[in-house]
Amino acid sequence: MKAQDVLDLAARNLRESLLRNSLTTLGIAVGVASLVAMLSLGIGLQTMASKRLMHSGLFDTVLVSSHRQFRGFGGGMRPQPTETRTLDEAARATIAKLPHVLEVYPEIRFATEVRYAGKPTFANVAGLPPSAAQNEAFEDAQGRFFSGPQAEEAILLADFAKELNPQVASLLGQEIVINYAERQPLSNAAEAGGFSLLRRERQLRVVGIVDREPYSGLRGMAGAGVFIPLQLAESLNVMQPGDLRGLTSAPEAKGRTFENLTVRVASPNDVEQVEDAVKKMDFGALSMLDATRNLQRFFAVLDLFLGIFGSLALAVASLGIINTLVMAILERRREIGIMKAVGASDGDVKRLFFTEAAAMGAVGGALGVLLGWILGRIINLGTNYYLRRQQLPAENLWLVPWWLVAGAIAFSVLVTLISGLYPAARAAKLDPVQALHYE
């Protein structure tokens, strides 16, 4: 029997029992819809969590320090001080040349006196790189980010801004003055490596206010109330803790030394490679790689359980397919007998029933994907409405990627084909003589 003949017969048989076949197809659609809804929820939650973590700036960075300076970050063997490399400008340039590294910068934080309207207030100042503009802390910030890497501008933490003026928004565009100790190298050759401190002050314009500190966590070693461009912070040449350590333990350093360096990589997938390369350079390296793996493991288990529960409805729908096809055998025994009497083989009969099952699976799968998408959109709109009522930002909790659409339809067809195994085998075993005498 030709493939076209099988398709024509299958289409005719499906049209003849339209109501029953439609209800069976609808059952498949409901099963696929539940599966798509469950998996799209898991995918949406994983995407939302990954996006948030990426915007936090923690999962695409590596914190680098000399082994001698890195004791506070865990146990393990440490090299002798004479074997420890110094984290200086030369080391910074070397790390910046590693593959997948986007930028390398030091953490510059210092205590200062901030004056606003003649009133002095103590605060910590921190330098922010240009890439910090993508940090989640600035998603709901008042004002804007720095206009340039050397701009004499400041962004205030909201809690600190309230100390300057309870009307926080009124600080935007205002001037503040910071006092700091500038590091000046000594000109005496006998005292090479030494430095003196000079009192300086710098006037800054407030351009933004944030509710939480950027990079809090891995890089948030000390709270800061004022943020300035990193290049501006470096140009101030403020004394850092590493400067004192460099006087006594790093005579080979070229230029100033750093407490630690932050290495930002192109993708979280490149963190492990960069971290291993840094360790081979005899520096300490710390990242959130283990936390990332644990998160991926959690979502893999979540997707598995959601997929299992979503498949239960599809399993129930498969029983409907078996029932529909078995009833079709009873109704079409004479037709099957005539087909076999005129030369149709057992394989032709099986292909006919498999084609009918696959057609119901494909239509039910496509309809189920559409229903699952509509269900997800409705729940997503309801969730965002609730979040807005709670004064929280809206989130996209449901995500239906193209591979889920294709996979759901293919899985639906596969389930229907498996469900059609017994009816097809039973139909193929019919004796044509008995089938022709069946009333």
Image: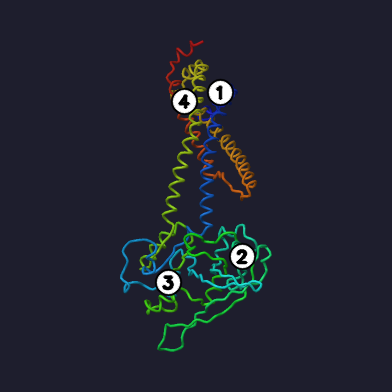
* Identity, as a three-letter code, of the amino acid under mark 3: Thr
Between 316 and 104, the one nearer to me in the picture: 104
Tag 4 residue? 348
Tag 2 residue? 163
* Identity, as a three-letter code, of the amino acid under mark 2: Glu
**Residue 36 higher or lower than 327, as above or below:** below
Q: Position of residue 166 (x, y in %)?
A: 65, 62
In the drawing, what numbered circle is on residue 13? Answer: 1
- Give the SS element for disc 4: helix
- Give the SS element for disc 3: helix
Q: Position of residue 371 (x, y in %)?
A: 59, 36
- Give the SS element for disc 1: helix
Q: CA distance from mark 2 to mark 3?
A: 42 Å
**Residue 279 higher or lower than 370, as above or below:** below
Between tags 4 and 1, which lies in front?
Answer: 1
In primary-sequence order, the first of circles 1 and 2 is 1
Q: CA distance from mark 1 to mark 2?
A: 79 Å
**Residue 201 higher or lower than 215, as above or below:** below
Tag 3 residue? 94
